[in-house]
């Protein structure tokens, strides 16, 4: 440890407010770290010190010369210190074990700092490793699509998915939170010590990360990926309309593949039938160009049944993603109440024009007076909503460019984003009529593809909440609700924000106002990719 330059303490009456005891050692300004020590023990030890004439600060500040902690490693304390802005480069601060403090208490003066009192910090053979630090809630962080740790986050996301598919929501969330922390880091992790003190990295996630950093792979992730159960769960829940519970039941009956399901004699509901029929299309990523083409159609539908109504692209595409598993739209009208009955008209229009392969509409069931503040942990909302499968025609102009078509692996239509104006796939009634078979025949000759589309109608008074709630990411939303509940005693849903302290709903007209009410810095959609 670099020898400490003693510094003059300008104001010696900062500490000891509680006891009023004389500050006997003005060159020593102490701070006890609550981490792992706990609030009550910290309060007790602080008061003890103050009674003996030590200056023990309640809040960390630049004047602190000695940080005392219990059961923390030097790296953990250093990471914490960095997060307080008291990092390297300033006058060095002593990082000390509690033993120094208790011995000083016994001696009635600051005892000499010996090696055994000093917290050991990791030596990083020459090259200094960046130690990362991020705030604990995902909604306090800015997470762009630029992820420097995809190998780690893919592994954790796979374990999260496996847990979610296995009815282990808690585990799933833990892995999702860990992955989200890594997504927010400004660089690649090369060594576990860089993660010391980061939030949300539990023992299990750390073990997976360590395995990958040290051995190149995690045995758990690899064996999960290869397991028959996981593979079957993926295949079966890949069917629109099939959730984890149904898949689980089928797997117990020995059904692992679509072929086995088809031969099983199970009666499928309407959604599942459509899901099976359009399986390949619905499991192929939707491109931004395709999303834009669908937006045009939805806008046409909406303005023709209610002029002045507005359509907003939400979900992953609003966050700037280039592909998605579906396309999400939020529809509203600037005059409250005018949106009433809108969904059925939009759906009728789309159906009459042959744009829908499947649709199921659920009615709006939200009533503030009846529902009260939504449960913060739930992301279920009660908007009028239409789950649909769109029939999206491929632009026939695209067919003239054979190379482009055959090279397209991930999507039927490969369109550069910048060119979407001239090259986006469009929907054409004539083409649609040409296709008689529902599944459209072989890939190369198929003139359309199926795309999952979610339509949601919100009254303008709830629009900002709906927009925030439907923009995602799912984890970002979950964290917003957790923040609201745990840190602000508020309850946030896609309909409203309720302040329990004031006992009233907070009205807003923009996302910015919601963040402000929550005491959070505004995070634009492109930085909500947690
Ligand atoms: P999606 O599942 O569509 O996710 O939900 P996404 O971020 O757009 O990702 P991909 O690309 O389609 O896979 C979009 C948002 O809508 C909210 C989710 O919480 C998410 O933030 N949502 C979804 C609801 O609020 N309620 C729902 O029933 C479904
Ligand atoms: Mn989506």
Image: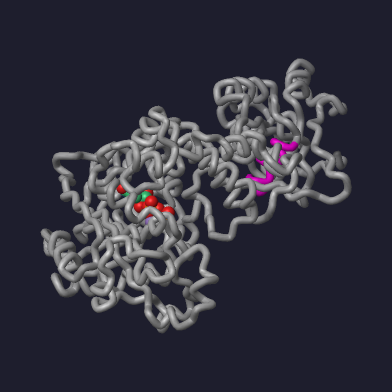
Q: Quadrant of residue 370?
A: top left
Q: Give the color scheme: rainbow, by chain, secondary structure or one colour.
A: one colour
What residue is at 33 percent from the left and 65 percent from the top? 440
Number of numbered callouts drawn? 0
Q: From the viewer's perspective, is residue 242 above or below residue 229?
A: below
Q: Position of residue 410 (x, y in %)?
A: 50, 63
What residue is at 46 percent from the left and 58 percent from the top? 523
Residues in magenta, as a range: 75-85
Q: From the viewer's perspective, is residue 209 above or below residue 25?
A: below
Q: Which is more toward the observer, 31 or 322?
A: 322
Give the main secondary structure of the magenta stretch: helix
Q: Position of residue 73 (x, y in %)?
A: 73, 31
Looking at the image, residue 185 sits to the left or right of residue 325; the answer is right
Q: State the residue lying farthest toward the front.
A: 263
Q: Quadrant of residue 168?
A: top left
Q: Which is more toward the observer, 520 or 101?
A: 520
What residue is at 23 percent from the left and 73 percent from the top? 433
Does the image show residue 44?
A: yes
Q: Quadrant of residue 373?
A: top left
Q: State the residue lying farthest toward the top.
A: 106
Q: Which is more toward the observer, 161 or 316?
A: 161
What residue is at 41 percent from the left and 56 percent from the top? 280
Does the image show residue 515?
A: no
Q: In which quadrant is the N terminus drawn?
A: top right
In the image, is residue 79 part of the stretch drawn in magenta?
yes
Q: From the viewer's perspective, is residue 170 above or below residue 109?
A: below
Q: Position of residue 366 (x, y in %)?
A: 18, 46
In the image, is residue 238 part of the stretch drawn in magenta?
no
Q: Which is more toward the observer, 451 or 68?
A: 451
Looking at the image, residue 493 sits to the left or right of residue 248; the answer is left
Q: Position of residue 383 (x, y in %)?
A: 22, 51
């Amino acid at each position: 440890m670099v020898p400490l330059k003693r510094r003059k303490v300008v104001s010696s009456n900062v500490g000891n407010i509680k006891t009023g005891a004389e500050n006997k050692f003005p060159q020593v300004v102490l701070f006890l770290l609550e981490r792992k020590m706990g609030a009550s023990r910290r309060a007790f030890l602080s008061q003890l010190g103050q009674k003996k004439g030590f200056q023990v600060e309640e809040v960390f500040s630049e004047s602190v010369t000695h940080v005392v902690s219990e059961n923390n490693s030097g790296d953990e304390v250093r990471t914490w210190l960095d997060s307080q802005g008291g990092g390297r480069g300033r006058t060095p601060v002593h990082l000390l074990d509690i033993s120094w403090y208790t011995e000083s208490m016994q001696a009635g003066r600051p005892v000499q700092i010996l090696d055994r009192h000093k917290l050991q910090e990791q030596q990083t053979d020459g090259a200094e490793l960046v130690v990362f630090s991020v705030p604990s809630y995902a909604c306090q962080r800015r997470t762009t699509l630029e992820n420097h740790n995809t190998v780690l986050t893919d592994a954790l996301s796979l374990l999260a998915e496996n847990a979610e598919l296995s009815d282990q929501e808690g585990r799933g969330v833990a892995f999702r939170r860990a992955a989200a922390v890594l997504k927010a880091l400004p660089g690649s992790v090369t060594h576990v010590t860089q993660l010391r003190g980061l939030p949300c990295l539990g023992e299990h996630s750390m073990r997976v990360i360590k395995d990958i950093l040290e051995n190149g792979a995690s045995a758990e992730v690899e064996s999960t990926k290869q397991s028959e159960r996981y593979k079957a769960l993926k295949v079966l829940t890949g069917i629109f309309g099939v959730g984890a519970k149904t898949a689980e039941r089928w797997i117990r009956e020995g059904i692992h593949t679509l072929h086995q399901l088809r031969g099983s004699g199970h009666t499928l509901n309407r959604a599942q039938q459509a899901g099976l029929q359009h399986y390949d299309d619905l499991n192929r990523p939707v491109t931004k160009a395709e999303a834009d083409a669908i937006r045009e159609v939805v806008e046409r539908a909406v303005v023709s049944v209610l002029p002045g109504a507005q359509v907003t692209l939400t979900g992953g595409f609003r966050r700037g993603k280039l592909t998605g598993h579906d396309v999400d739209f939020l529809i509203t009208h600037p005059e409250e109440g005018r949106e009433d009955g809108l969904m059925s008209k939009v759906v009728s229009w789309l159906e009459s024009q042959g744009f829908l392969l499947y649709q199921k509409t659920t009615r709006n069931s939200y009533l503030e007076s009846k529902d009260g503040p939504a449960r913060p942990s739930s992301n279920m909302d009660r908007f009028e909503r239409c789950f649909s499968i769109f029939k999206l025609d491929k632009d026939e102009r695209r067919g003239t460019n054979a190379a482009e078509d055959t090279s397209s692996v991930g999507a039927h239509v490969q369109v550069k984003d910048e060119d979407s104006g001239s090259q986006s796939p469009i929907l054409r009634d004539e083409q649609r009529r040409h296709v008689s078979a529902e599944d459209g025949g072989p890939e190369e000759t198929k003139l359309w593809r199926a795309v999952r589309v979610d339509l949601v109608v919100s009254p303008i008074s709830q629009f900002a909440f709906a927009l925030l709630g439907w923009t995602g990411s799912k984890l970002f939303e979950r964290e917003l609700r957790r923040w609201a509940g745990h840190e602000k005693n508020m309850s946030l849903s896609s309909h409203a924000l309720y302040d329990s302290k004031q006992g009233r709903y907070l009205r807003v007209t923009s996302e910015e106002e919601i963040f402000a009410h929550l005491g959070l810095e505004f995070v634009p959609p492109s930085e909500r990719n947690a």
